[in-house]
Amino acid sequence: MRRKTDQQALIRRRTLLQGLGVGGLAATVGVLSPASSFGGPGSVADIDSPLLFHSPKLTPFVDQLPRLPILTGTDITLTANSTTHSFHRDLPPSKALAYSGADYLGPTIEARSGIETTFALTNEMGAHPLGKDMDMTLHGMQEDYRRHPPTVMHLHGGVTPADSDGHPEQMISPGQTVTHRFPQRQEAAHMWYHDHAMGFTRLNVYAGLAGMYFLRDEFDTGRIDNPLGLPAGNFELPLVLQEKIFESTGQQSVRSTAIVPEGSWEGGAVGDVGVVNGKIWPQMSVSRGLYRFRVINAGSYSVWNLHFSNGMQFFVIGNDGGLLDAPVAATHIRLAPAERYDILVDFATLAEGESVELRNDEAPPFQAAVIGAVTMPLFCRFVADGSTPSGARVPRTLRGPAGPLPLPPIATPTVFRDVTVSQPYILRNPPSIMTLNNLKFSSDDIEKPRQGTVEQWNIINITPDPHPIHIHLVHFRILGRQALRTVDYQLAHPQPPVGTRWTPSAEGFVTGPLVPPEPWESGWKDTVRIDGGTVTRIVVRFPTAEELGFDPDEPFSAMAHITGDARTGQPGAAAHGGGAGHGGEAGAHAHKDLQGYVWHCHLLDHEDHDMMLKYRVVQ
């Protein structure tokens, strides 16, 4: 018994030291909140740490919460541009990226369920604003990307043919255009579009390549006269939430610590300022009535526990894949990167001139907290004014006679699949790598579910941190989460070197009952939070080609639907080689045949190195 205890202690120490290593350190280090500069509920002390970078002191609530532009139609044309953007009144404009119609982020696109939309994206970017932070050791990276960054666009939550899904190796260089086809044979949903470029998704999205995408139908029309009676027009508002670190020049920074050299991968960091729709700690005047907020965690690392500073109740009416059966009353929701929640907030309880703040009190993961990282507590403030309210009321039901069909019971799986989430130590710089199934992205040892099959995925997380797992193409339901005796599991099943599949069953190592999902998680999901030291069980049905109207396993070229000449002085990024990835994999994506989709962690730093795998839906 003593020997087993010593082994467990050794594993714990080794895990912690991996997090403290150079390169691996940034997977655990965050920056400290400057909230003490303004005080108020939930404020935290600002601890001066020599290890961590800090944003300059900034006054909150001096900028108005922006309303993002709206774009509608069945033929959407966008460009990815280099821009400058002012994130705060007291910061100078700084370099950023955006989709056309904005100087940061992109327009909110509204499309119609059942009506196909074509989406043409042209790369017009110049030198990357975060080019100095590119790590050339990651899969497929090339030195020229600093000056001529490629991009690829993924419609997150879309049921999309593989050749239009935004495969990370289907990149376009400046001067090139790619045309996507979105059949949209799915219910109304809250989706988003964002960059998905191989090896530096984190940098492109952080710099600004992200936007909201609302799929409407005959029930959730977006009009004031919608059959569900939901707030619409000026009373429906996307809230794109991020946390960031800024340099004194106003430039966005993805670096959290000087211990990790510039140009080296960091595993993610807690930001020290909250950003909403591109502004730091903004303020919005609201009428004393009901609003519909379409909320997304568009950050790169942290899970947030969102709540209002006065503890007031709100109602969750939908999540990733559409509406719930009925509104769910809540006073807080946990929101992981890439998750979306559709909430109704009634400001009628506020007196005119009274304000309330949208806050977060989720503590950083243990490995970040032990080094000194603290909670980033604040996003924005709402101030009640005397304007006319929407007149909308919280509906009793959302599905049924006056809406879409009720959510079906969770299907019974016939296939059970174990997959793992881990952070092995490697004798290389950086000294850790984030993996699924202990494999690299280049592996061909992939999941191949059959079309028409209902599967249960048991996602086994042996790390102490939460990871949001996103599966392209499909939606699923959450069965629940169960605690895992990770040390016993690892002792019984020693993890082999990275590159060898490692997916031992967790049965016999779980403890306690299966904890069902929170009521607001009960609908269709495309991203699920996998808490540290747990097994999260989801049920997913993989659709058939007949149901989809396309074959999800149809091979396609990396150059599919790409036109135009790359303006790089050399062949386009999607059509030339160079660069070495993990273990020397070729960086070339030239004319290669691609097939299928990907599933990955949506902590984007983790996705880039190397917590993303391919998968296919076979016949």
Image (tube, helix red, strand yellow):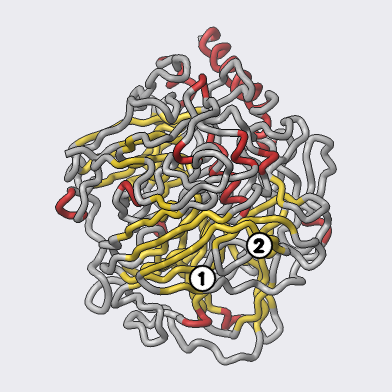
Give the vertical position of 505 relative to 299 (above or below).
above
Separation of marks 1 and 2 at Cα, in angstroms: 14 Å
Q: Residue at x 67, y 34 (%)?
A: 26
Which type of secondary structure does the marked residue at label 2 adopt?
strand
Which label sits on residue 570?
Answer: none
Q: Residue at x 35, y 70 (%)?
A: 74
Q: Residue at x 65, y 72 (%)?
A: 65
Q: Between disc 1 and disc 2, whose residue precedes?
A: 1
Give the vertical position of 104 relative to 13 (above or below).
below
Which type of secondary structure does the marked residue at label 1 adopt?
strand
Q: Toward the viewer: 10 or 243?
A: 243
Crowding around mark 2 (Cα neighbors within 10 Å: few <14, some 14 to 19, many 20+) is: many
Q: Toward the viewer: 321 or 16?
A: 321
Image spot of residue 269 (x, y percent) = 66, 42
Q: Is residue 542 visible?
A: yes
Quarter of the image containing the C terminus? top left
Q: Is residue 177 left or right of residue 370?
A: left
Tally the numbered discs. 2
Image spot of residue 304 (x, y percent) = 58, 52
Residue at which label 2 appears: 379
Q: Is residue 363 left or right of residue 584?
A: right
Residue at which label 1 appears: 293
Image spot of residue 480 (x, y percent) = 36, 45
Q: Is residue 607 visible?
A: no
Q: Toward the viewer: 592 or 512?
A: 592
Which amino acid, mark 1? Phe
Image spot of residue 518 (x, y percent) = 42, 54
Q: Residue at x 43, y 19 (%)?
A: 499
Crowding around mark 1 (Cα neighbors within 10 Å: few <14, some 14 to 19, many 20+) is: some
Give the vertical position of 293 relative to 258 (above or below).
below
